Amino acid sequence: MRSIVLASASPRRADLLRQMGLPFVARAMDLDETPAPDEAPAHYVERLARAKAMTGLANDPNALVIGADTTVVGDVGMLGKPVDMAQAQTMLASLSGRSHRVMTAVALAGDHGCFARLATTEVRFRPLSADEIFAYCQTGEPLDKAGGYGIQGRGGVFVDGLWGSYSAVVGLPLEETAMLLAEVGEPVWRHWSKLKGRRQ
């Protein structure tokens, strides 16, 4: 079986790959993540996911490299990672009491080429008070999260509805990732018996 590389420094994406039962190594990719002018959110996340996977493949051409990218799309457009607490508060206020979309693309690069899939999830927030937005921002959790919140952390208390993939909101759509691996002859279930054997 080919080695698997996660082209990301995200601990959340690493946790999700471990949840799938995959052996892998994680390597951060240094890329310019600035959206192009008038770039559609779906195109943006797929472009970055592919770029991360292909950059990782250039460093390790014998591996299967997984790249992923996430953005939140609200009423005001794409919401990336806030640069400071003030921007995080503004983002969360714009999501309060409304629905938004979380778009995550995952790409798999290897000697087969590079293929990608997109997962779009609708998330609805209950109305948030200014005090709880401020308190949440003080925890520091929003700063490295698209849209300024982590659904798997304290930000999960803001969500009163979700339609689609929870794991995609966290940062890596499990179903789409498994499908990409299966399509290149590396179904995730083949690794499960090996994991069991190592525990005995």
Image (tube, grey):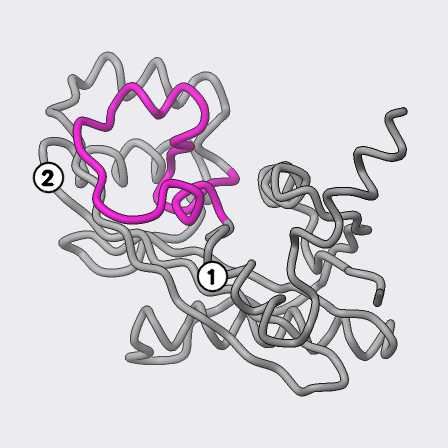
> Percent from the top left, x then y, of residue 14?
66, 42
Image quarter where the C terminus lies is: top right
Amino acid found under the numbered disc labelled 2: Arg
Image quarter where the N terminus lies is: bottom right
Q: In the rendered image of this protein, does residue 20 appear above or below residue 150?
A: below
> Percent from the top left, x then y, of residue 78?
29, 59
Under tag 2, what secondary structure? Answer: loop
Per the rendering, the mark at residue 176 is 1
> In the rendered structure, does residue 167 fall within the stretch colored magenta?
yes
The reply, left or right, for residue 39 in relation to residue 190 is left
> Percent from the top left, x then y, of residue 82?
42, 43
Seen at 39% across and 23% down, the residue is: 137
Seen at 33% across and 78% down, the residue is: 39
In the image, the segment drawn in magenta is 144-171
Is 64 or 133 nearer to us in this picture?
64
Q: In the rendered image of this protein, does residue 146 appear above or below residue 116?
A: above
Under tag 1, what secondary structure? Answer: helix
The reply, left or right, for residue 105 in relation to residue 3 is left
Seen at 34% across and 80% down, the residue is: 37
> In the rendered structure, does residue 92 fall within the stretch colored magenta?
no
Amino acid found under the numbered disc labelled 1: Glu
- Residue of label 2: 98
Neighbor class of circle 2 (other Cα within 10 Å; few <14, some 14-19, many 20+) is: some
